[in-house]
Amino acid sequence: MVVKKSDDFSEWYNEVVELAQLTDKRYPIKGMNVWTPYGWKIMRQIDTYIRQELDATNHDEVCFPLLIPETEFKKEKEHIKGFDSEVYWVTHAGLNKLDIPLCLRPTSETAMYPIFALWVRSHSDLPLKTYQIVNTFRYETKQTRAFIRVREIHFFESHTCHTTEEDAQKQVEEDFVILERLNKHLALPYLLLKRTDWDKFPGAYYTVGVDCPLLEGRSLQLGSIHHYRQNFSKPFEIKFEDVDGELKFVHQTTYGMSERLVGSIVAFHGDDKGLVLPPDVAPLQIVIVPILAKGKVEEVLAEARRLRDELLAAGLRVTLDERDDRPGSKFYHWEIKGVPLRLELGGRDIAEGKVSYAIRLNGSKGTFLRGNAITDSRAMLDKISADMMSNAARRLATSVETVSSLDAPPKKILRFGWCGSEDCGHKIEEKTELKLLGTPYNPEDFHGECIMCGKQTNIVAYAARSM
């Protein structure tokens, strides 16, 4: 690594992504990057956990078309108002101009909801709980950054329909539980912040952002959860007949997360040596590096292969590095890629019936008995996961600072009193050049003054440098 994380975070991030070979940015459309094998394996592991959680909560996976007719896209005025500057349009099929232009989905409400209107007829059809993992397209106008600001986005989105607003609210609460369970595999800290009215998702009743704290007061939005009420069901005519035979519009929710989860793992866990991957999402949980010496090469390689095969048979993701290279060079290579556990096996280890290990997270080293390879490797991976969760909780606590003045604010996520007015909100953003992230979804006890106008308030707000 050339750049230290604390010296130049942006340059460090770009360097880690490139050296770890997570993506190839040389595709000839800016912001549409190629998923390379290592990065794609991380994303697929995350997708696997998303599917597990959604399937376990009775969501059904669907897959809707990429193209949306302009006629459907325009049905929800607030929606197109929010996305019209970011949409890619298809206007021709071959040499023929289309009668109705088609847009590439920026998100899927206007693709899915005309069909939901056909699927939902009676209260017995509800709740309707669906999800899909697809690519979405938005013309990102800011400087692109791998996984964080891209124009083709690997995206998970759930869409649900309910008989009542209260039942939809229960779905929002379930989404928070799904998020918590998913995050056990990612070990990321996050804040649940209710977005301001001017910053909520177009067409939403309210939006809750999932915000991950990074270095020096930066914040990265990992995803969002929305309660729509009937703001989409009315223009799309999604109605059901209740038990009394009365036609009513459904209440809806959505929950979305993207490949930013990969970017957040890089940005939050990575260090000056490269990636640090949580064991659950690491493409390789263990790398075995044979320490070869003259006269012992075949013996060491044979034992290293036996060790690899045992660990693979136990369900662990393992590779044996048999490249013709120095051990130190191999160590450096796998440290950049963030493999959680490195095992070393040489002639002395074999003679003593031991295996040497090194933990990527904290650099600790030691040995364990060769006969305990499976149990001890699993135990260390479990401990790494637990330690990463503990680190995340500790860093979250130190990332936020309550302030009473915006003069010379610290490089933290700021917590302060706010009167709730849009005027003061915009003034806060203008003065600090920070983004007002919103207010805690779970209310926090606060009594004080608005940091801008001085009015007494019990509203607390958060602001940060957005990525």
Image: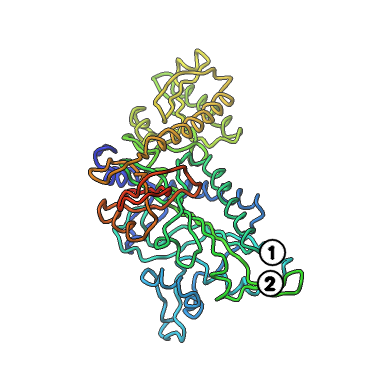
Name which residue type carries label 2: Phe
Residue that numbered label 2 is attached to: 240
Which label is found at residue 29?
none
Which label is found at residue 126?
1
User: Looking at the image, is 267 positioned above or below residue 60?
Assistant: above
Name which residue type carries label 1: Leu
Number of residues whose C-alpha sits closer than 10 Å to that of mark 2, classed few (under 14), some (14–19) or many (20 or more): many
Q: Position of residue 346 (x, y in %)?
A: 44, 20
Number of residues whose C-alpha sits closer than 10 Å to that of mark 1, classed few (under 14), some (14–19) or many (20 or more): some
Q: Position of residue 371 (x, y in %)?
A: 58, 19
Q: Are marks 1 and 2 in contact (CB under 8 Å)?
A: yes
User: Looking at the image, is 448 positioned above or below residue 59?
Assistant: above
In screen coordinates, is 292 left or right of 60? left
Name the residue furthest front.
456
Dot 2: element? strand
Give the quadrant of the N terminus: top left
Q: Is residue 313 visible?
A: yes
Dot 1: element? loop
Q: Position of residue 120 (x, y in %)?
A: 67, 70
Q: Is residue 467 visible?
A: no
Which of 193/222 is in front? Answer: 193
Q: Position of residue 162 (x, y in %)?
A: 64, 63
